[in-house]
Amino acid sequence: MTVHPFIEAEKRAGHNVKRACELLKVSRTAFYARRTGTPGPRAVRDAELAAQITDVHTRSRGTYGAPRVHAVLKRAGAGCGRRRVARLMRAAGLQGRHRRRRHLTTVPDPRAALRPDLIVRDFQPDPNGLNTRWCGDITYIATDEGWLYLATVIDIASRRVVGWATADHLRTDLVADALTAACRQRRPIDPVIFHSDRGCQYTSQQLASLAG
């Protein structure tokens, strides 16, 4: 609740404005600034800081939140507190981007059968070995609608992506679609060694039947 109307009433009644401001712990400058419509020193400083904050936030490509914006302003010699920066950023509708938590994509199936490493950890490219060794993996991409999962199949000989698929889930269908796309793209004649981690999607019976 503002006390300015009360002070205004006291003034109209002929009472001392200075004394009323002291009793109510209100800046007399702020009272007269509000009364005349002229912005006070704090409002002027807030406007200056808001412009600096917007500039720092823009130069960070919208990634900086209040702590980092405050750190930049502090290094530049701007005398302002972190809470003030946070308040002005909220008023301006500015916020930083939060780093998303790492998402787990490899969940081993303890019941899956062990399979030998047929490529013996040899991931060196070989121009003469196309369509003999492929490897698969899953990664994830943060979007405005949630996580998007990307499964890829890479030909180790050329290190080129030969098949891929995306989905909003981590079921075996995702890696199966990527492997199917690779087979359609390359159409290998001879058997191909397919290497992957021990995630449950790659050790599933569904994928074993497909690669069979």
Image: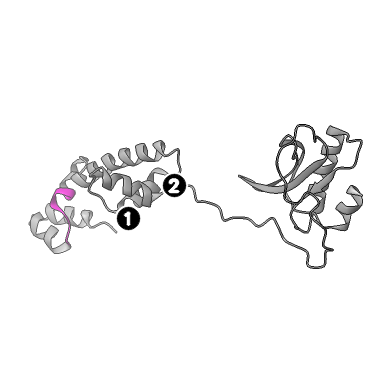
- Residue 58, relative to residue 145: is it above or below? above
Residue wearing tag 1: 83
Q: Where is residue 113? Give x, y as percent.
A: 84, 63
Q: Nearer the viewer, residue 94 or 151?
A: 151
Q: Residue at x 26, y 56 (%)?
A: 2
The three-letter code of the residue at mark 1 reads Arg
What residue span does the magenta drawing correspond to? 25-31
Mark 2 — residue? Answer: 95
Query: Which type of secondary structure does the marked residue at label 2 adopt?
Result: loop
**Residue at 16 percent of width and 54 percent of height:** 27
Amino acid type of the residue that numbered disc 2 sits on in the rendered structure: Gln
Q: Residues within 10 Å of mark 2 (few under 14, many from 20)?
A: some
Whether 182 is among the magenta residues is no
Q: Assign the N terminus to one quadrant of the image.
A: bottom left
| First of labels 2, 1 by sequence position | 1
| Residue 83 shown left or right of residue 136 in the figure | left
Counting other residues with Cα less than 10 Å from the Cα at mark 1, is it few (<14), some (14-19), or many (20 or more)?
few
Q: At 32% across and 49% down in the image, what residue appears?
A: 71
Provide residue 138's location: percent of width, then percent of height.
71, 48
Q: Is residue 96 left or right of residue 212?
A: left
Residue 15 shows in the view:
no
Q: CA distance from mark 2 to mark 1?
A: 14 Å
